[in-house]
Image (spheres, rainbow, N blue to C red):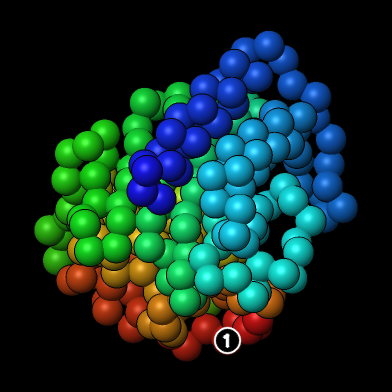
Amino acid sequence: MTDLELILEAAREAGALAVSARDKGLKIWSKDGGSPVTDADLAVDALLKTRLRQARPDYGWLSEETVDDPARLDTARQFLVDPIDGTAAYLKGKPWFAVSIAVVEAGRPVAGVVLAPALDETYAARAGGGATLNGVPIAPSAAVHLEGAAMLGDAKMFAHPAWPAPWPPMRVESRNSIAYRLCLVAAGTFDAAIAMSPKNEWDLAAADLICAEAGAALTDHLGRGFAYNEAIPLLPSLVCANRALHPLILSRVGHIDLPQR
């Protein structure tokens, strides 16, 4: 079984568990930083950790819901996992949450799956093999102008008066799951996605490969690509778009000074 086949099977099991756990009722509490977590997050994490590490015991492990073990830094390949990305939507009964699983080698994802179980959408990719949605190849949109673009991001951010030049009129929407947002751009459902706040490696790794294989561009706001399995698994920002819009967005956000990891 290939890595992609393995994580596809595991993601399907995890997605089914997430849906059934929400249907049964959740126990909810807050992490140290104040963000919500549920018993389902931990149950899905445990399922994936058992399933994947039994199949690949030599792979490292980095997950939102597992205490980080620096031993992963010395492994040749790693699983990067977000058991339930988009917990806020998950808690509210919305469909915009996803299971995100990537296999990383030498700092880059080589297999990735983002599965949105409530929407029956499975995005998948392997390095050099293209990207798919439910088995059908995907590609980003052909939009060439920001005006009128379908943008995923914070509407208040775009409307802020501090921008050197106002953003043109755009259709701005939000989706809680970061991984799912990026997949929507990779598939051409939206034209671009922007976030000017730090994101964790497990949020982006699988979707990064899906975007690359689909033909979308994903970088930080300075146009730099991402490396994974770092000692501090935090990324400063994200700009994701088709190849025409990506440089137009960078020209508007590149002046922003954000903390680096």
Measured from the top left, where is residue 215 in percent x and y? 21, 63
Residue at (70, 37) in percent of width and height: 46
Relative to 127, does residue 172 appear above or below in the rendering? above
Image quarter where the C terminus lies is bottom right
Q: Residue at x 76, y 40 (%)?
A: 36
* Residue 40 against residue 209 in the figure, above or below: above
Point out residue 212 in the picture as x, y percentages from the top left corner.
29, 65
| Residue 133 % position (x, y) | 26, 40
Q: Residue at x 21, y 56 (%)?
A: 130
Q: Is residue 92 above or below residue 125?
A: above
Residue extending farthest right: 32
Picture quarter with the N terminus: top left
Amino acid type, mark 1: Asp
Q: Give the image location of residue 231, x and y in percent.
A: 68, 77
Q: Which residue is mark 1?
A: 257
- In terms of image quadrants, where is residue 48? top right
Of 190 and 97, the residue lying toward us: 97
Q: Does residue 224 appear anywhere in the picture?
A: yes
Q: Is residue 87 left or right of residue 125?
A: right
